[in-house]
Each structure stands twice: as C-alpha cells, then as structure tokens.
Amino acid sequence: MPNLDTVIVRDVGLRDGLQSLARTVPTDIKLQWLDAAHAAGLRELEVGSFVPAHRMPQLADTAELVRHALGLPELRVSVLVPNLKGAEAALASGAHSLLVPLSASHAHSLANLRRPPDEVVVDIARIRDRRDATGSACRIEVGISTAFGCTLQGEVPPDEVLRLVRAVLDAGADAVGLADTVGFANPLQVQGLFEAAAREAGAPLACAHFHDTRGLGMANVYAAWLTGVRRFDACVGGIGGCPHAPGASGNVSTEDVAWLFASMGVPTGLDLQGLLDLRRRLGQWLAGETLHGSIARAGLPRTLTGG
Amino acid sequence: MPNLDTVIVRDVGLRDGLQSLARTVPTDIKLQWLDAAHAAGLRELEVGSFVPAHRMPQLADTAELVRHALGLPELRVSVLVPNLKGAEAALASGAHSLLVPLSASHAHSLANLRRPPDEVVVDIARIRDRRDATGSACRIEVGISTAFGCTLQGEVPPDEVLRLVRAVLDAGADAVGLADTVGFANPLQVQGLFEAAAREAGAPLACAHFHDTRGLGMANVYAAWLTGVRRFDACVGGIGGCPHAPGASGNVSTEDVAWLFASMGVPTGLDLQGLLDLRRRLGQWLAGETLHGSIARAGLPRTLTGG
C-alpha cells in the first residue's frame, strides 16, 4: 500500500499554458488568474519564464507576476529559466524556485535550447554557484524534458535520461523531475523510468510533468505516484497543447489531477469547485481556445457538492 | 516487471452500448458492425442479451446476432443473461460464453435484477447444473457490478465484493470479473480490490469492466492490469454512458484501450486504424449520440500510420 502523504500540484498554466498560445494575456487578467488559483488552494505556481521579451512576449511580465505572487500567503512561486542570465533574473525577483529545462533528446535540446544537454548541465553548475554566492534560498530544480520520447528524435534511450538525472544532481541541482513534453509516455514506461531514476537519485523524483495528448495522462500520473512522486505539474483546463497536434489535449488538467487524488483519499489542499470556477473564467479570458479535462464535463459527484 | 502476455479486449458495444440508448439499431446495421469489429481484430464480442424482448427491444435480435457471429473465424461470442431462463436461451444459441451480472450493491441488485445478490448466486448454481446437464462447453462468467460504489447505495464494502467472488466461484462459475458500473472507481481502489479478489480466487480475475465517467478509465485499466488481469471490456467510441450523467463518457473506448496496450508493447491483435474506421461508421449509425475517447481526437502517432 503506497503512502497517502499530501500531493502537491504545481499549476504551470501561466507559463506552459500561455507560452504555446499566440495571444498575449494582459497582466491584470494574469493577476486575477493568480489570485483565483491561490484561492482554489494551489500552493505552488509557475508564473512565467525569464526569457528575452522579444522571444516570448506572452511572458514579458514575469517579474511583475512574481512580485504579486510573493504577496500571497503560503504560495511557492516558481519560474522557468533557460540559462544563467534567466537564473540571475529569477534570483533577483525573489522567486522561491527556478526550473531549468534540459532536453534528454539531443535533437530537441538543439532545436529548443540551441545547445546539447551536457552544455545545459554545465550551466546548471554555474547557476548553482551564482545562487550560493548570492546567499539566496531559491531552489534549483531541473525538469528533464522529452524523457519519454521526442517528436524530432523519436526514441530517447532511458540510459541517457538516467545519466542526465545523475549529472544534474552532481552539478548541484536541488531537485529533478521528468517531463513527457510531447505526450508520448505510457504508464508502464513511466513507472519503469521513474523507478530507475529514483534509484539513481537515491529518492523519489521531485516532480512529474505529463501531457494528455492521447488520453494516458491520468494513468501516467498514477504510475508516477506509485514510484513515490508526490508533486505533479498540471494546468487548469488542460491548456498547453502542442500547436502541431490538432485536437490533442495539453497538460494534464489540474482539476482532473485534483479529482484523481481526492478520489484516492490523498490530500492536496485543492478546492475542486474553486478550480472549476477558475476554469470557467479561463474559458472567457482565453475565448476561442479549447479547454480539456474530464471532471468539468462530467461534473463533480454529488457526494462532493452536497447537491 | 509485469508480464507482457496478450491482452484480450472484449467489445461490449452491441450490448452495454446499445442497451443504454433509446433507439433500436436495425439488425442489418448490427451485422455490419459485428463484421467490422471482427475485421479490426476483435476476437471476443458481447453481441447482446437474452432478456425478454418487451423489456429491452433494442436487443431482441440477440439470437440472430449470435448465429451470425458464430460464423466468423476465431471469434468468441458472448451474451449477457439475467437469469436461468436467459441462460437456457444462451445455451441453445450456441454462444461460447454467457455472462451473469451480479450487483455487489444490495440496492442496485434489487433495482436492476429485482432480487438480492445471494439469490443470484443460487441462480448461478442452477445455471451451472443446467449447463453441465446439456453437455454444453459454454463458459459461465460472472460480472460483479457496482463493485467500486453505487449511485443508489453509495459505498459498497470491499469485504462484500470478496465474499461474492468466493460465493459465485463456489456456485460453479467458470470465471469472475469486477465492474465499475457507474464510473466511481479510482486506480488505487482498483488495484487493491483486484489484488484482494485474486487472492480470494486463487488467480487474477478473468475480466475488468470500467466506465470513463470522470476521466480515470485508462488509469483504472492500467491498475487492474498491474494485478494480472489480461482481459478488459470496452466499447468502440466509448458508448454506453449512463443517461443520468449528462456529458459523462460511457465505457472505456476500445480504441483507447488498444492504444494503451500498443504503447506499452502488449499484444492485443487489434488494428487501431480498423477500430477508428468502425468508430467513424458508428458515428453515422448512431447519429446524434456523442462518441468519446482520446485517440480518435488526437490521431494515431505517425510511427504507427507511417504518415
């Protein structure tokens, strides 16, 4: 029987969700979004990314979002950074965590980060040095993306993923997670790779990040949970879909992940009705985008709503 | 590492799918459906139910469907029967398997079968006697429904489910499976109850039957598979939804289950493109009904289609 310790859901909609959309959501809407996510019980949010504004104008207001988020009680504020320069901005912003993405797929790494994985490892060591030099308590987390396959490269060897888990921990990362960036993972593969990575790291991994491209998102969350993972990325409304896969879902939806754990008796601190309310508002703010997820379609069971 | 033995998917669309619809599908369409399902690699089909025609006119042509299905090579033909009289019709029809539903929920049993579970157990013993007396090789299978909860009764005690597993095997059933009739199950519950039932039965259970009401269908299939189950009910297009849960999905969709196992490297003999073609035809035959499932929405990955 696995332990039923609290699971943390980190909503990454303001980063992973928005970076895939062509539109730019106004900052005042994002602040309402942040407040509503916090009110629904989310205690960790990835609020943006410190990338050059000309490369990702949708996320140019990240520093302002961090500032606002730091004022919300008990909220862990996380940002994505692609390199040392981004990490310096993150350290200056006061964010609690910075996430460095590293592609296990060599091809994806070159296309997305413009350098091979091992150069990112070197950068992680530099980020660690800089963090320690500033005396910041900011947590350095690495998300190993395309860990379960890659649209460019196809198969990604598990041994390469495990080598990189070891390498980023050796380079000074405080935590490491695995991401199924393109929605290729199946639960058997998830369970096997997360188990092997936990052996490599000496403890269950810090985070799992799944997309629901072909309907296996919840099964993958469950499979990773079985290996001891107790922290999951998700997006309200399942936004964050790959624009090159029409009809496909994006990230696993926060409300479905919340429902999965609620039904299993695992505490998350999340308010399902609050998440569904935020989803409705997202539907207005992102009018024209397709939202995904099952629990919003089926409705909460009466046992939860008292209806 | 679980074994990767062949998994059998039993499509129950012609029974579970159609019995929930008000419309009656003409027999000639059902025969095309049968042929297409067989052509897509399905080797076990539940083609109908031997219930009084006035109670379920949609399934009044079950004997004709069995006759046709028996002519298709390597196809196991299964029918549902509610009682001894139905079982006699099944034995006379030449079907390879008859499935007796038994509700673990006392309230559901009274509402659906008009008698408590233990009277159904007595009936199973009678069905076994009759089967043996006729010298038929028809397999007697029991599906324990509402095993994970019930809309009428709420919680269904796991001990009651396990008692009934034992009781139906003692009464002479050849095989027993568990069904989440109303879509209440979560994967942790599924794994726990199927494991306990396997200990009770001395072997993994013969079948698992899930609905995808709130998006946990695939996770539940995976969880049951981890306990050794190698046979799953499903419906092309995820039909079979409860008419009392608007927007909710029905049974797990055959094409999604096929995709889950294909992605895990588990053989099923199913032709995913053939299943998607049948789904398209179902969409025409059942015009106005909502079809469900993820793989049809996202499309097969290029690695499978060669596109």
Image (spheres, coloured by chain):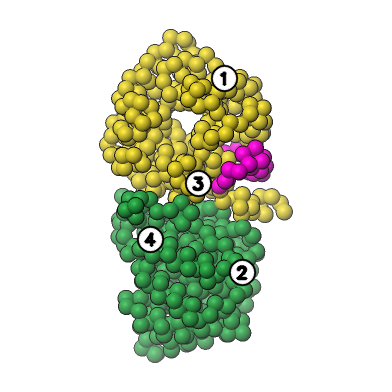
Chain colours: A green, B yellow
Q: Are marks 3 and 1 on the same chain?
A: yes
Q: Position of residue B65 (x, y in %)?
A: 60, 23
Chain ID, mark 4 = A
On residue B249, the disc is: 3
The residue carrying mark 1 is: B63
Side of A193 where B300 appears, left or right: right
Q: Are marks 2 and 1 on the same chain?
A: no
**Residue at 54% of width from left, 77% of height from top?**
A25
Q: CA distance from mark 2 to mark 1?
A: 56 Å
The residue carrying mark 2 is: A108
The residue carrying mark 4 is: A272
Chain ID, mark 3 = B
Q: Determine whether the residue tagged by mark 4 lies in a helix, strand or loop.
A: helix
Chain ID, mark 1 = B
Side of B11 where B242 appears, left or right: left
Q: CA distance from mark 3 to mark 1?
A: 29 Å
Q: Determine whether the residue tagged by mark 1 lies in a helix, strand or loop.
A: helix
Sort mark 3 into few (<14), some (14-19) or many (20+) by Cα contacts within 10 Å.
many
Q: Residue furthest right?
A: B307
Chain ID, mark 2 = A
Q: CA distance from mark 3 to mark 2?
A: 36 Å
Disc 4 marks which amino acid?
Leu
- Examine the structure image and report whether residue B287 is included in the region drawn in magenta: yes
Q: CA distance from mark 4 to mark 2?
A: 36 Å
Q: CA distance from mark 1 to mark 4?
A: 47 Å
Disc 2 marks which amino acid?
His
Q: Is residue A53 at least partly visible in the picture?
A: yes
**Residue at 63% of width from left, 41% of height from top?**
B287
Q: Which residues are magenta?
A: B266-292
**Residue at 50% of width from left, 68% of height from top?**
A282
